[in-house]
Image (cartoon, grey):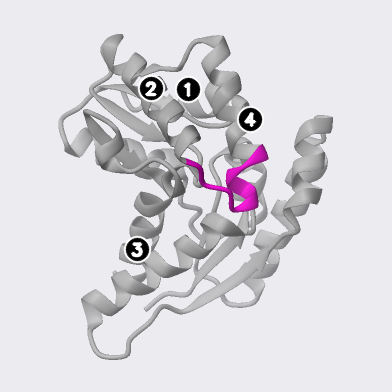
């Protein structure tokens, strides 16, 4: 079994689910008391969020890249970044390591393509929905990506940062996310991507009328399969 290095804590609410999913997958495959070999670097998310809001992406990238290198030095044979938004810095991280870096959008796109779907609705932070680093990656796999209208993008972004990363899960916000997902379906989306790892703490498959792709779970399962090869 290969050792997985996790860059997490962005936020820890969803990073814990990464650990749970990876360990459950490994135990399911190997049985008994088996669990994964993990090395974890977990951040104070308030510092990362501050860099995001200030546009300090270069500084954030330098921090993540340096820590990815430390994970490799500590024995990690696979590196994953437990957040969608910070994949904006994927190239900096890859440049700092020699072991495989498993990109969350690649893992998600592969799962969607395997299911035979091509037109998807994307929910995530404003950075993920509006910047090219994520949508462009999905489009490079041949997917047609829809994002919510501007007012709904604001709702999704604000719920993530004001509620979900703080462990707040409300019925009102779930209803809003379900409504926004339905608006994407009405525009032709065949599936909904939970393109922020915290969204799947709120929105469940039964809350949408089409296929649902929880990126944290997909990413974690992809890493676990790679570790067991």
Spatial distance from mark 3 to mark 2, Cα to Cα? 36 Å
The nearer-to-camera label among 1 and 2 is 2
Q: Give the secondary structure at mark 4.
A: helix
Residue 136 is labelled as 1
User: In the rendered image, which quarter is residue 2 located in?
Assistant: bottom left
N-terminal label among 3 and 2: 2
Which residue in the structure is indicated by mark 3?
226
Residue topped by disc 4: 158
Of the numbered discs 2 and 4, the one sitting upstream in the chain is 4
Q: Secondary structure at mark 3?
A: helix
| Circles 3 and 1: CB atoms closer than 8 Å | no
**Which of marks 1 and 4 precedes in the sequence?**
1
Magenta span contains residue 89: no
Give x and y (percent) for residue 4: 49, 69
Q: Position of residue 116 (x, y in %)?
A: 15, 30
Crowding around mark 2 (Cα neighbors within 10 Å: few <14, some 14 to 19, many 20+) is some
List the residue tagged with mark 2.
Answer: 179
For label 1, count other residues whose C-alpha is less than 10 Å away and answer few (under 14), some (14-19) or many (20+).
some
Relative to 131, is 53 on the left or the right? right
The correct choice, above or below, for 143 with respect to 188 in the image is: below
Q: Secondary structure at mark 2?
A: helix
Mark 1 near mark 2, Cβ–Cβ under 8 Å? no
Left or right placement of residue 119 versus residue 147 in this view: left
Q: Residue at x 40, y 58 (%)?
A: 220
């Amino acid at each position: 079994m290969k050792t997985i290095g996790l860059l997490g804590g962005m936020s820890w609410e969803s990073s814990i689910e990464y650990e749970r999913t990876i360990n459950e997958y490994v135990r399911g495959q190997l049985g008994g008391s088996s669990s994964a070999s993990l090395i974890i670097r977990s951040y104070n998310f308030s510092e990362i969020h501050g860099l995001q809001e200030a546009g300090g992406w270069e500084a954030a990238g330098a921090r993540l890249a340096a820590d990815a290198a430390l994970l490799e030095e500590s024995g990690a044979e696979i590196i994953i970044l437990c957040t969608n938004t910070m994949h904006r810095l994927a190239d900096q991280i890859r440049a700092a390591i020699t072991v495989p870096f498993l990109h969350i959008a690649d893992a998600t796109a592969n799962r969607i393509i395997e299911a035979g779907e091509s037109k998807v609705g994307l929910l995530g932070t404003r950075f993920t929905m509006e910047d090219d680093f994520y949508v462009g990656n999905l489009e490079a796999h041949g997917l047609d990506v829809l994002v919510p209208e501007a007012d709904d993008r604001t709702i999704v972004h604000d719920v993530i940062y004001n509620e979900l990363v703080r462990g707040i899960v409300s019925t009102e916000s779930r209803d809003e996310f379900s409504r926004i997902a339905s608006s994407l379906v009405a525009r032709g989306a065949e599936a909904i991507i939970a393109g922020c790892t915290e969204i799947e703490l709120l929105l469940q498959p039964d809350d949408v009328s089409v296929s649902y792709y929880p990126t944290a779970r997909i990413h974690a399962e992809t890493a676990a399969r790679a570790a067991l090869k």
